[in-house]
Image (cartoon, rainbow, N blue to C red):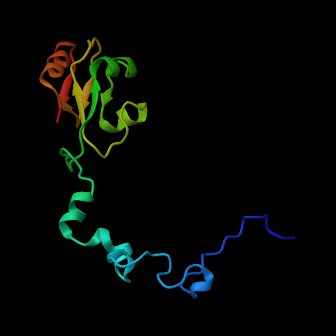
Amino acid sequence: MKPARGAKTYPKRVGRGNASGKGTTAGRGGKGQKARTGGRNRLKLLGMRRQMLQTPKLRGFKSHYEKDEVVTLDVISNAFADGTKVTPRALAKKGLVDSVKSQVKILGGGSLKKKLIFIGCGVSAAAKEKIIAAGGEVRE
């Protein structure tokens, strides 16, 4: 068995005398920096300024702090029964929050008609009003 024709390619032999067709200048032309030993591949790295200009820059700002997980009252009222305790762990079990590691904040979107107890969650001012109006409470 032999490899398919054209599958194996060998590098061009260069600088092996004028009879080979690639003698004297070895295919690099005559003179100039690119013809010299160190110049050809290192031309781009000739200056720090050029290197800095070529590297892509990341624009804008990215905070190192995690953002709070956000849940609205509307979603919570559909997921929890009347009189239950709502904690970050309970929200994660119901699939309303991705993880318990980041903090949870409850926003006042929608309406709440159930009496719920919120423990260990950040609550916006509008959400707090709606929770108290429904007969629930907020514990820090």
| Residue 112 location, quadrant | top left
Position in image of residue 120 (x %, y %)? 23, 37
Q: Is residue 9 above or below residue 80?
A: below
Q: Where does the N terminus fall, quadrant-wise?
A: bottom right
Q: Is residue 7 above or below residue 38?
A: above
Position in image of residue 78 (x %, y %)? 38, 17
Q: Along the horizontal axis of the image, is 67 left or right of 17? A: left
Position in image of residue 25 (x %, y %)? 46, 81
Q: Decide which of 89, 71 is in the foreground and name it.
A: 71
Q: Residue furthest left?
A: 125
Q: Along the horizontal axis of the image, is 21 left or right of 86? A: right
Q: Decide which of 57, 14 is in the foreground and name it.
A: 14
Number of marks drawn = 0
Q: Is residue 127 above or below residue 52?
A: above
Q: Along the horizontal axis of the image, is 1 left or right of 106? A: right
Q: Residue furthest bottom?
A: 17
Residue drawn 35% across the image and 81% down it: 38
Q: Decide which of 61, 94 is in the foreground and name it.
A: 61
Position in image of residue 87 (x %, y %)? 30, 34
Residue drawn 28% across the image and 22% down it: 72
Q: Residue furthest front?
A: 19
Residue drawn 32% across the image and 77% down it: 33
Q: Along the horizontal axis of the image, is 74 left or right of 64? A: right
Residue drawn 35% across the image and 32% down it: 91
| Residue 140 location, quadrant | top left
| Residue 75 location, quadrant | top left
